[in-house]
């Protein structure tokens, strides 16, 4: 991964998008063009006169669907960490993020997370533009006291250029590793790896690469990166390699060998904003793999010497200040090439003032000058015409010479043995995270607890009855559960409270009732009807959700004429209860489901709906359902009916019953999700996205308790008890079912800076 993007290569190199051109000044007006920001090209827009204009980062943030880094979030960062925000955060150099608030949540609670960044080695020496994201990453490592992994993508640079050889990238990676180490990282917390070395030696890492490759299509890569049929296959596959370090299971030597625990550890990726397309791909696929999505924090580019419409490039010596440059080289480059925001004469400059937004020396000072007061004086003086261009360049030269000189002193002390220390996988990593975590039960004042509902639920909705009469007997089934087959430890499983006293507020006061009428149903007994059975009379509508997920099918072991086989399902549940007061009726609600299917996960993650749980189904077996802060349970299919609208495209409607008899679950108003009728012409493995409504009806006269004299789960009237969800009914094979329940129970919805909850899917990838 290149933290400032792979455009260190010439834009017109093989496999690269065409290089943007600029009309010479004497050709007069030309057509305008939009800015182009990708991992391979960074170019500002072109105005009517043919001049390249500064990159519009606000527009870029909007186009990428990221969230601006607000003062409120920076203030929260300072409050949570007790540290002053880095100058990059204070000055708008770090500009946007994806779920940075979730990392602050984890730090506040003392939970594990790590940092991940990288570099695409394309030259013997890095330049100061490469150094800035690493400097910010080092600062975050010091503040959070957390592990850091740094990926050197030698394979990427080799694949993207016909001019670079394998020997070249091997040398560049070695030298760049020394540059990175010299920026001050802690060897006890930092792991640096070269892709070509680590992939060949780490099965967990390569397994994650394969999982990502399997989930990523050629069309996705073409659409994201602009590739065409002339790009080599390595370029298409590389995105998976850059995604794999975002999953903690790739580093068992740091986080431990147990994937059940490590898959829940999130990461924060500090990077330049041109790298965001890689990690959008990663975030899109993470829930499908049952991993947590990585959080990202973006920085802007250090502009090239020629102006803020481009960035420094290692392939253009006159555009960059290299970390190996001598003091005279720095002075000459700034004086000769640095674009000035001053006026064309001293008189006009004194009269009109300079433009710091275009002045490259001032822009460099905003990156490297620590003193906020001095920077403000330089800004105001230049804008008023009191400080001339020569003075601004002089101060810029001094600051850069000091920065590069200090780096070179540290770099001289980095040896091959130092590099081995940072790249070793046979050492102990030492990190502390938050020394003073906030306990979950102390996060809110005690007086407020009784007034607040659990996360993801509407506290103002009261209890009521469902206006649907029972047509058949309820789903209550007496069961016996075998306890402790795996000896699950307390830290591996989260305790849930079976809310038999209905502390979690139901939504039945709305008077809504689940739609039952389909087009046709054929139950296992062979009797066909045209609707689902309604909820039993002793139930209430406890929860209402919109689900969005993926159904994974296989034709690998099927005959061409047979139907595809469902392998597994993963669905994220979003709480629909708060929407009820704003909607006219159920029909209005039903009309939203197709919109949810068309809506991107990224935008849903920006707070459209609150996460309230998940559903996972493995190998077509029972569903494992987690309703956050309500319950975790198994559910088995009771009946199905074809969707009344577009049954060939929309998944079956269904009614399921929980194994313990407490729940009836209706899966209705589906949009998408219907597999093809046969495997004819289908790939061995494929997935279908869908959205639907989930109506959760709860039997209000069923309570649960643990018998003190046996390992049985007793069904019947009993006081409220705290029980571990992995002692619910364990069907054969019991070991596998318990692991599913354990993972489902570990699902959390973490509130971000906007206090919207995020869905984290933690079911096991079998």
Image: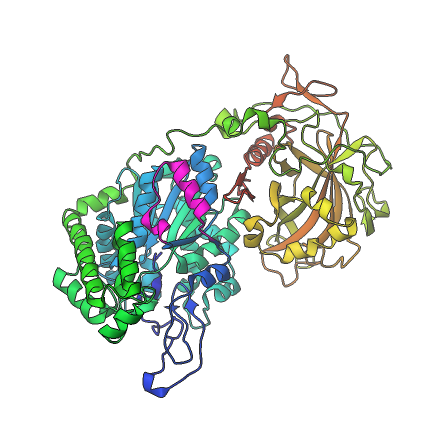
Q: Does the segment drawn in magenta span residue 619?
A: no
Q: Say whether residue 637 is visible.
A: yes
Does residue 610 appear left or right of residue 385 in this picture?
A: right
Which residue is drawn at the image coordinates 23% and 42% (left, top)? 421
Q: Which residues are magenta?
A: 68-91
Display colour scheme: rainbow
Q: Quadrant of the N terminus?
A: bottom left
- Can residue 88 be found in the magenta stretch? yes
x and y, in percent, of residue 218 in the image: 50, 64
Relative side of 491 to 351, left or right:
right
* Residue furthest out toward the top: 709
Above or below residue 624? Residue 213 is: below
Residue furthest out toward the bottom: 27
* Residue 648, position as x, y percentages in the image: 74, 59
Depth check: give the residue in front, 655 or 503.
503
* Relative depth, front residue between 126 and 492: 126
Pick the front one: 508 or 626: 508
Residue drawn 37% across the image and 44% down it: 115
Q: Main secondary structure of the magenta part?
A: helix
């Amino acid at each position: 991964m290149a933290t400032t993007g792979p455009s260190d290569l010439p834009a017109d190199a093989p496999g690269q998008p065409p290089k943007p051109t600029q009309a010479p000044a004497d050709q007069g007006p030309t057509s305008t063009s939009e800015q182009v920001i990708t991992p391979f090209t960074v170019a500002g827009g072109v105005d009517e006169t043919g001049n390249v204009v500064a990159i519009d980062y606000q527009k870029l943030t909007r186009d990428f669907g990221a969230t601006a880094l607000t003062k409120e979030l920076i203030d929260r960062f300072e409050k949570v960490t007790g540290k002053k925000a880095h100058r990059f955060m204070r000055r708008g150099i770090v500009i946007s993020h994806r779920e940075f608030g979730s990392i602050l949540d984890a730090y506040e609670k003392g939970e594990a997370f790590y940092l991940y960044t990288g570099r695409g080695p394309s030259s013997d020496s890095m330049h100061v533009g490469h150094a800035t994201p690493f400097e910010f990453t080092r600062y975050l490592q010091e503040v959070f006291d957390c592990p850091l992994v740094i990926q050197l993508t030698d394979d990427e640079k080799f694949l993207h250029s016909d001019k670079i050889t394998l020997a070249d990238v091997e040398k560049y990676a070695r030298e760049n590793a020394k540059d990175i180490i010299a920026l001050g990282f802690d060897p006890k917390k930092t792991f640096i790896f070269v892709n070509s070395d680590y992939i060949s030696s780490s099965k967990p890492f390569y397994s994650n690469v394969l999982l990502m490759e399997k989930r990523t299509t050629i069309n996705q890569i073409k659409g994201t990166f602009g590739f065409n049929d002339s790009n080599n296959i390595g370029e298409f596959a590389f995105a998976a390699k850059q995604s794999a370090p975002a999953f903690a299971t790739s580093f068992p030597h740091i986080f431990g060998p147990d994937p059940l625990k490590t898959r829940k550890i999130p990461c924060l990726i500090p990077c330049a904003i041109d790298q965001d397309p890689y990690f959008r791909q990663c975030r899109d696929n993470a829930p499908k793999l049952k991993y947590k999505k990585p959080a990202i924090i973006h920085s802007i580019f250090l502009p090239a010497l020629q102006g803020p419409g481009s960035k420094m490039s290692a392939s253009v010596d006159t555009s960059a200040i290299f970390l190996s440059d001598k003091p005279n080289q720095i002075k000459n480059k700034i004086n000769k090439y640095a674009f000035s925001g001053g006026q064309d004469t001293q008189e006009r400059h004194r009269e009109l003032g300079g433009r710091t937004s275009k002045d490259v020396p001032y822009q460099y000072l905003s990156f490297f000058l620590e003193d906020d007061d001095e920077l403000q004086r330089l800004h105001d003086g230049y804008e008023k015409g009191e400080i001339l261009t020569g003075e601004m360049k002089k101060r810029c030269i001094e600051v850069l010479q000091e920065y590069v000189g200090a780096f070179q002193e540290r770099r001289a002390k980095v040896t091959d043995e130092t590099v081995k220390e940072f790249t070793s996988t046979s050492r102990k990593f030492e990190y502390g995270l938050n020394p003073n975590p906030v306990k979950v039960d102390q996060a809110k004042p005690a007086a407020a607890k009784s007034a607040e509902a659990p996360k993801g639920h509407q506290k103002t909705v009261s209890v009521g009855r469902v206006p649907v009469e029972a047509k058949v007997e309820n789903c209550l089934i007496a069961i016996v559960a075998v306890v402790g087959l795996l000896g699950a430890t307390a830290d591996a499983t989260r305790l849930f409270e079976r809310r038999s006293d209905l502390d979690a507020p139901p939504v039945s006061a709305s008077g809504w009732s689940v739609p039952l009428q389909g087009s046709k149903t054929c139950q296992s007994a062979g009797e066909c009807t045209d609707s689902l059975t309604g909820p039993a009379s002793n139930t209430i509508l406890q929860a209402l959700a919109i689900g969005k997920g993926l159904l994974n099918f296989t034709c690998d072991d099927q005959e061409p004429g047979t139907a595809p086989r469902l392998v597994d399902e993963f669905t994220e549940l979003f709480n629909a209860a708060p929407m009820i007061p704003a909607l006219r009726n159920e029909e209005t609600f039903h009309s939203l489901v197709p919109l949810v299917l068309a809506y991107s996960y990224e935008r849903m993650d920006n707070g459209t709906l609150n996460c309230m749980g998940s559903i996972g189904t493995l190998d077509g077996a029972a569903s494992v359902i987690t309703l956050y802060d309500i319950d975790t349970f198994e559910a088995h299919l009771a009946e199905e009916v074809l969707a009344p609208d577009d049954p060939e495209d929309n998944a079956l409607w269904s009614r399921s019953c929980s194994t313990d008899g407490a729940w009836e679950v209706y899966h209705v108003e589906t949009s998408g999700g219907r597999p093809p009728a046969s495997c004819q012409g289908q790939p061995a493995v494929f997935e279908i996205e869908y959205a639907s409504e989930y109506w959760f009806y709860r039997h209000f006269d069923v309570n649960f308790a643990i018998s003190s004299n046996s390992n049985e789960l007793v069904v019947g009237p009993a006081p409220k008890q705290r029980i571990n969800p992995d002692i619910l009914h364990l069907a054969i094979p019991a070991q596998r079912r318990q692991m599913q329940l354990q993972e489902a129970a570990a699902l959390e919805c973490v509130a971000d800076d906007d206090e919207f909850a995020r869905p984290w899917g933690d079911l096991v990838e079998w």
